[in-house]
């Protein structure tokens, strides 16, 4: 029977982890998967996380089940972090989910259950797993133009023109901040325009926010989605603590739902609990409990916020330094956009052949669309990297 299984194409991002590990060169460079690396090339456990874990180990008295929606103090902390006071809490429910991916998967399933005809509109390009999960679930996919290769900014006119084809009951998926893979983000005014389009056409927004704190600041990165949340009747949010809490492997995410009223909230909540039960019963506790401890302890929270801000500043410096090194090595302003973009990623704009040449000739690993992880850039030796890039263009 098992011979009937279909071959599976490897995930283009995750595949890089194995390819990089197998490369024997000592001066290789991993700019693939989105993971923060410090000056020593390590992905450390954040200070507040270490402290909260020590407390958890000392104080936890039971490993018994928590509940299908997970740790409610964690869900409340994420609601506060992401939505603030933009929406009446009586209209919001949420569930702890295994990572941002887990939240996206559950919310896609919820959309399918509510409206099997809905088309989910994703940006072109988007994080590849958006499309992969939608395809796996057999859902309708629409794509809206997003990135303008010529300006390396958002093609907002194209985005609006494509969303004009969406029908009432469709879902428009937006990246809350730090667009993955392009690093180009819509402005506050553009968030307002998309909100108006959603209201006029009866579209439901779904926001994937996986990099809060890595763009313009923890609070600033929510401005767009909060202004939208304040106006629309219904909205879905998939949040991740993988990056801003560095809890990658612990799988800590949340699905938040804004419903029209309290009765809608009760229905949404029951559906989230049901979906969790059907897929895995209980979300994993450890990482979410750690986040809850941090967010409910003023000193730990302040320390966490300070560390996130340091990481953000470091990425801004790396963006600026890379743009300058590329300007020197290519004698052009072609890569100046790196300093303008925000978040963990930008694309170099190279062909797949050029990406492969960087891998084979220099041991430099990046995703096939030439997306690089800014937080994986070396602190020293950016000129060497810029030289290698210049040699393949
Ligand atoms: C990425 O885009 O590199 C991260 O979100 C990790 C992943 O799961 O793809």
Image (spheres, rainbow, N blue to C red):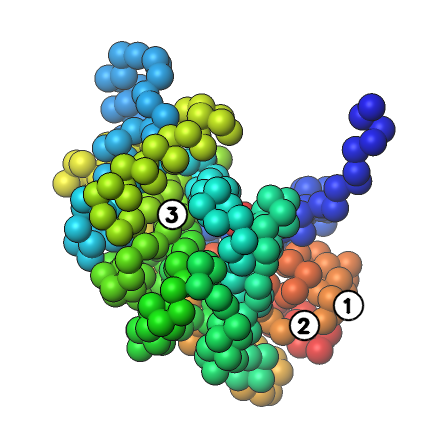
Q: Secondary structure at mark 2?
A: loop
Q: Look at the picture and state if 109 lies above or below 280.
A: below
Which disc number belongs to residue 239? 3
Could you tell me which quadrant the N terminus lies in?
top right
| 340 or 333: nearer the viewer | 340
Instruction: Tell us which disc is closer to us: 1 or 3.
Output: 3
Give the spatial CA distance, label 2 vs label 3. 30 Å
The residue at the point 57 percent across, 66 percent down is 143
The residue at the point 41 percent across, 63 percent down is 203
Disc 2 crowd rating (10 Å Cα; few below 14, some 14-19, many 20+) is: some
Q: Secondary structure at mark 1?
A: helix
| 123 or 258: nearer the viewer | 258
- Where is residue 100 drawn, in percent x and y? 45, 44
Quadrant of res 331: bottom right
- Where is residue 377 drawn, in percent x and y? 52, 59
Disc 1 crowd rating (10 Å Cα; few below 14, some 14-19, many 20+) is: few
Q: Residue furthest right?
A: 3
Instruction: Tell us which disc is closer to us: 2 or 3.
Output: 3
Which disc number belongs to residue 350? 2
Which disc number belongs to residue 353? 1
| 357 or 221: nearer the viewer | 221
Give the spatial CA distance, label 2 vs label 1. 8 Å
Give the spatial CA distance, label 1 vs label 3. 35 Å
- Where is residue 344 drawn, in percent x and y? 46, 59
Left or right of 375 on screen, residue 301:
left
The residue at the point 17 percent across, 51 percent down is 88
Quadrant of res 188: bottom left
The residue at the point 25 percent across, 24 percent down is 55
């Amino acid at each position: 029977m098992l011979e009937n299984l279909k071959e599976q194409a490897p995930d283009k991002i995750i595949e890089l982890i194995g390819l990089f590990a197998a490369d024997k060169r000592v001066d290789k460079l991993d700019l693939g998967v989105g993971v923060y690396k410090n000056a020593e090339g390590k992905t450390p456990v954040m200070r507040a996380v270490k402290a909260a874990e020590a407390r958890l180990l000392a104080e936890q008295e039971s490993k018994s089940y928590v509940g299908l929606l997970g740790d409610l103090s964690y869900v409340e902390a994420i609601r506060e972090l992401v939505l603030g006071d933009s929406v009446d809490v009586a209209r919001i429910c949420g569930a702890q989910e295994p990572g941002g991916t887990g939240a996206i998967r559950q919310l896609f399933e919820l959309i399918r259950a509510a409206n099997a005809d809905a088309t989910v509109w994703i940006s072109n390009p988007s994080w590849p797993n958006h499309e992969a999960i939608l395809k796996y679930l057999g859902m309708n996919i629409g794509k809206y133009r997003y990135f303008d290769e010529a300006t390396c900014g958002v093609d907002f006119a194209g985005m609006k023109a494509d969303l004009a084809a969406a029908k009432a009951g469709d879902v428009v998926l937006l990246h809350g901040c730090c667009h993955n893979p392009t690093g180009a983000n819509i402005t506050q005014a553009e968030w307002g325009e998309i909100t108006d389009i959603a209201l006029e056409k009866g579209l439901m927004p779904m926001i994937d926010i996986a990099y809060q704190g890595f763009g313009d600041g923890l609070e600033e990165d929510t401005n767009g989605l909060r202004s939208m949340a304040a106006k629309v009747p219904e909205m879905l949010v998939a949040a991740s603590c993988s990056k801003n809490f560095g809890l990658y492997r612990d799988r800590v995410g949340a699905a938040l739902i804004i419903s029209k009223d309290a009765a809608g909230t009760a229905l949404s909540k029951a559906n989230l609990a049901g979906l969790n039960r059907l897929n895995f019963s209980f979300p994993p506790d450890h990482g979410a409990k750690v986040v809850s401890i941090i967010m409910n302890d003023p000193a730990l929270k302040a320390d966490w916020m300070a560390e996130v801000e340091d990481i953000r500043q470091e990425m801004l410096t790396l963006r600026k330094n890379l743009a300058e090194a590329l300007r020197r090595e290519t004698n052009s302003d072609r890569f100046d956009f790196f300093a303008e973009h925000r978040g963990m990623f930008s694309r170099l704009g190279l062909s797949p052949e050029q990406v492969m040449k960087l891998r084979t000739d220099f041991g430099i690993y990046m995703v096939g669309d030439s997306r690089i992880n800014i937080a994986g850039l070396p602190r020293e030796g950016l000129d060497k990297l810029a030289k290698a890039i210049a040699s393949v263009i």
